[in-house]
Image (cartoon, rainbow, N blue to C red):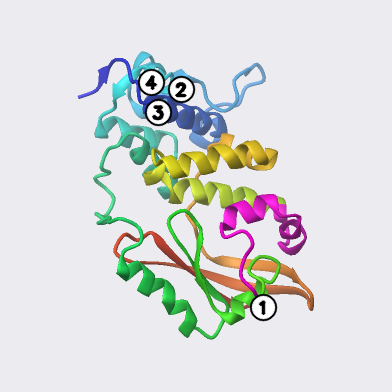
């Protein structure tokens, strides 16, 4: 049962910030409402979201303002549907509320760094096309020689000077020249990182990482504040290599007991 009250952990505030961003991104036309010329609010109004979700405007306002200690599964489901959240955004919403999504498949979790995870990462060495593995924090676990050649600005012959993919993308000038359409790809990576690390949001290491990168990169700070959430998916990727622009199709696979290891494989397009 939903119950208003104080929340000292800050989780209610995080939930509210995310809902407000989702509300402001959703345009009236997308839900069958007239745009109107006198709108002063970006996206939808709070009362419009409440109507779409079949909850009271007061209750929605409390949730968005972080004035509630617990939000029921039924309310979260209504919010996800009313705000037209994607699968990744829905999963992130339930993670923020510390609720189990009844529509999601149960996935067992175990501490990152289990032997199975390390063995899964080592599979990249058996692959013939560029491949690398990241841990739950997006630090490099392993890569093959093909990946070192393709990702030379990052991985190089002697190993990466910066082991974290996201930090390298945002802080190394070489990444901006090497990744075709860097602004779009960088913002997407930030949204994927938010979705991928939702379960780590209270982890001290994760919190330090995000705070430091936000302070070091105005681009990442803006992308993080946007509250965008996207699944880490495959698709076409273009890189400006020494031999000229090259296109690859990326496949992202999850492995290990915890599902925290990501195997990224790139096949020539």
Sequence-earlier tag: 4 or 1: 4
Using a 10 Å C-alpha cutoff, classify the residue at mark 4 as few (fewer than 14 neighbours), some (14 to 19) or many (20 or more). Answer: many
Quadrant in the picture for residue 93: top left
Sequence-earlier tag: 4 or 3: 3
Residue 165: percent from the left, percent from the top?
58, 58
Residue placed most toward the observer, 120 or 20: 120
Q: What residue sits right under mark 3 in the picture?
A: 52
Calculate the distance from the C-alpha at mark 1 to the C-alpha at mark 2: 52 Å
Using a 10 Å C-alpha cutoff, classify the residue at mark 3 as few (fewer than 14 neighbours), some (14 to 19) or many (20 or more). Answer: some
Disc on res. 60: 4
How many marks can you see?
A: 4
Contact between marks 4 and 3 (CB within 8 A): the answer is no
Query: Any magenta on residue 52?
Result: no
Secondary element type, mark 4: helix
Sequence-earlier tag: 1 or 2: 2
Calculate the distance from the C-alpha at mark 4 to the C-alpha at mark 1: 52 Å
**Mark toward the viewer: 2 or 4:** 4
Residue 107: percent from the left, percent from the top?
27, 56
Residue name at image x 24 percent, y 22 percent: 2
Calculate the distance from the C-alpha at mark 2 to the C-alpha at mark 4: 10 Å
Q: What residue sits right under mark 2 in the picture?
A: 48
Q: Is residue 175 visible?
A: yes
Residue placed most toward the observer, 264 or 43: 264
Which residues fall within the magenta stretch? 158-182
**Compared to 120, does 138 lie above or below?**
above
């Amino acid at each position: 049962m939903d119950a208003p009250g104080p929340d000292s952990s800050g989780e209610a505030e995080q939930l509210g910030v995310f809902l407000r961003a989702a509300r402001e991104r959703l345009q009236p036309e997308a839900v069958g409402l007239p745009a109107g010329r006198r709108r002063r609010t970006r996206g939808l109004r709070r009362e419009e979201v409440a109507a779409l979700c079949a909850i009271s405007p007061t209750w929605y306002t409390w949730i968005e303002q972080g004035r509630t200690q617990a939000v029921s599964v039924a309310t979260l489901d209504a919010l996800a549907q009313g705000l037209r959240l994607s699968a990744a955004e829905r999963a992130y919403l339930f993670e923020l509320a510390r609720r189990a999504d009844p529509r999601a498949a149960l996935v067992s979790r175990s501490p990152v760094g289990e032997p199975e995870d390390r063995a899964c990462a080592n599979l990249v060495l058996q692959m013939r096309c560029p491949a690398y593995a990241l841990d739950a924090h997006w630090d490099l676990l392993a890569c093959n020689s093909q990946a070192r050649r393709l990702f030379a600005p990052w991985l190089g012959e002697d190993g990466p000077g910066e082991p974290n993919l996201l930090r390298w993308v945002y802080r190394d000038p070489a990444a901006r020249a090497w990744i075709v359409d860097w602004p779009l790809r960088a913002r997407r990576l930030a949204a994927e990182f938010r979705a991928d690390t939702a379960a780590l949001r209270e982890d001290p290491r994760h919190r330090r990482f995000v705070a430091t990168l936000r302070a070091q990169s105005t681009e990442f700070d803006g992308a993080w504040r946007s509250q965008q959430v996207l699944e880490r998916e495959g698709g076409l990727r273009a890189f400006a290599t020494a031999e000229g622009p090259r296109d690859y199709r990326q496949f992202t696979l999850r492995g290990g007991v915890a599902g925290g290891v990501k195997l990224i494989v790139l096949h020539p397009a």
